[in-house]
Structure formats: structure tokens, C-alpha cells
Amino acid sequence: MIAMGGARLLVERNVRAYRRQWFVFASGFAEPLLYLLSIGIGVGELVGRIPGPGGELVTYREFVAPGMLAAAAMNGAILDTTFNFFVKLKYQGVYDAMLATPLRPFDIAAGEVSWSLLRGAAYSAAFLVAMLLFGLVHSWWAVLVVPAAVLIGFAFAGAGLGATTYMRSWTDFDLVSAALVPMFLFSGTFFPLSRYPGWFEWVVKATPLYQGVALERALVFGALDWTTPLHAAYLIALGLVGVRIASRRLATLLTA
């Protein structure tokens, strides 16, 4: 996606805009690491060992770390394609100016998604380094952890971009928080699915973050099975649908 001309130009624009504001990215690196230290290590001493993706008993911090990596990819992608995108769309008029050039609405959607993927991938790569330093990686399949994080970012970036085109005011963003916070807490990030009631387990499995958590956990532990490509396919499909909706909505909003 980044290789496409119009999208590449928008990514370059964002790089230039943020080059003197690098500090705004600091929280995306620090937040998941602090969660790992406080919950994975601190609470982990109280929890003990729990079943991992392959059925073996693992320490709590080993279980939580892949989930936090998936959450880092989600947060890095969703921030740029919701709040930041809304400001540029509704208040700054950035995209109106872009359409005065040969750029199309699809270029804008693809470019913003590509930019958010770079941000999410950077957060995930930094978190993977921290996992390696803490000795929380147990398989060579972990070399695919960052590409998997890109898929997670793609899913949430597409969904976030598409949803934001329907936002009318800042009040609507309460819905974003209402969706993200429960997903973060109950998508298998902190507890295995066996801890949930049977009906709620199926609800959790339907969420995109669970798909990302399950994919990352399988790669970190090397516990791949027939469901692993299904997790990846789910994330790709969600991202494609979101980008398609966003490009159509932008064409309507910016050319009306």
C-alpha cells in the first residue's frame, strides 16, 4: 500500500509534519511496557502459572506479553485513524487541499492507513525487543510477530478510518472508547478464554483484538495450528472493508 504513489505522498507529508514532534509517540512505546511491568510481573507473582496456547503451563508475564504487543499495535493504529484523522478532516481542511491536487479519496484513505501501520509496527517492534530482553520469546516463529502486528494495525486502522467518517462531533468519540476499553480488557489479553462463561467466550472470539492476540500468542510460543491463518484472514478482511468504506465516504464528504 505504501508503494502506491498517492499513498506514499501522504505518508511523506505526515513524516514531515511529525519530525519535530517525535515526543508525541513516546506514550505508545512506554504504555505497554509499563503494563507488562506492573501487571505481567507484579500481578504475575500472585497469579502463578496458567495454561498457554499449546496447553502447557506458562508464567503470567509470558502469557500477558503477546497480548500487550497486540494491544500496542491496535493503539498505534487507532489513534491516527480516529482522533488525528477527525481533526484533519473536520477542522484543519487538510484533505480538501489535497483533493485540489491529483490525489484521490482512495489515496487519502490508503495513505492514512499506511502511516498508522508504520506507527503501530514501530510500537510493536520496540515491545518485541523488550520481550526478548525479559526472555519472554520461546520460538523462532516470533520473527513474524511484527508482520502480524502490521495485520492487527491494518484491521484497526481500516475500521477506525471507516468509522470516523461517520463521526459528527467529539461526543461521538465516546463510542470509540466504549468499544476499545472492553475489548482491551476482555479479548484474552489478560486471561485465558476458559475463564469466561461459554456464551461470552464466543463474543470474545468475534472481536478483532482477540484475533490479533491469538495470532501473536501462537507465534511467540510456536503453537501454530489450523486457526492461525484464519486469524490473519479475519484481520486482512476487516482492514480491506474499512479502507473501502472510508474511501467511499471521503469521496462523498470532500466532493459534496
Image: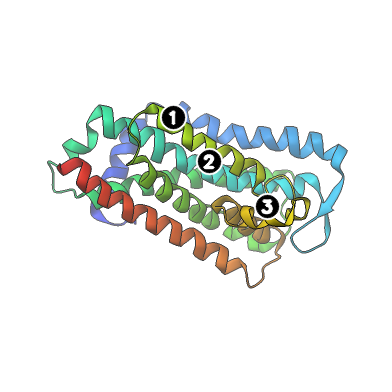
Q: Position of residue 68 (x, y in %)?
A: 64, 44
Mark 2 lies on residue: 179
Tell me whether the residue at label 3 lies in contact with that at label 2, contact meaning CB atoms closer than 8 angstroms.
no
Residue occupying the point 27% across, 47% down: 249
Report the Cα–Cα distance between label 3 and label 2. Answer: 16 Å
C-alpha separation, residue under disc 2 versus residue under disc 1: 28 Å
Where is residue 112, by image quadrant? top left
Q: Is residue 209 in view? A: yes
One can see residue 2 in this view: no
Does 121 sit left or right of 100 as displayed? right
Mark 3 residue type? Phe
Render colour scheme? rainbow
Task: Name the amino acid, label 2.
Answer: Ala
Q: Mark 1 points at which residue?
A: 22
Residue under label 3: 200
Q: Is mark 1 on a helix, strand or loop?
A: helix
> What amino acid is found at the position of numbered circle 1 in the picture?
Trp
Q: Badge 3: few (under 14), some or many (20 or more) residues near its Cα, within 10 Å?
A: few
Q: Distance between the residues labelled 1 and 3?
A: 40 Å
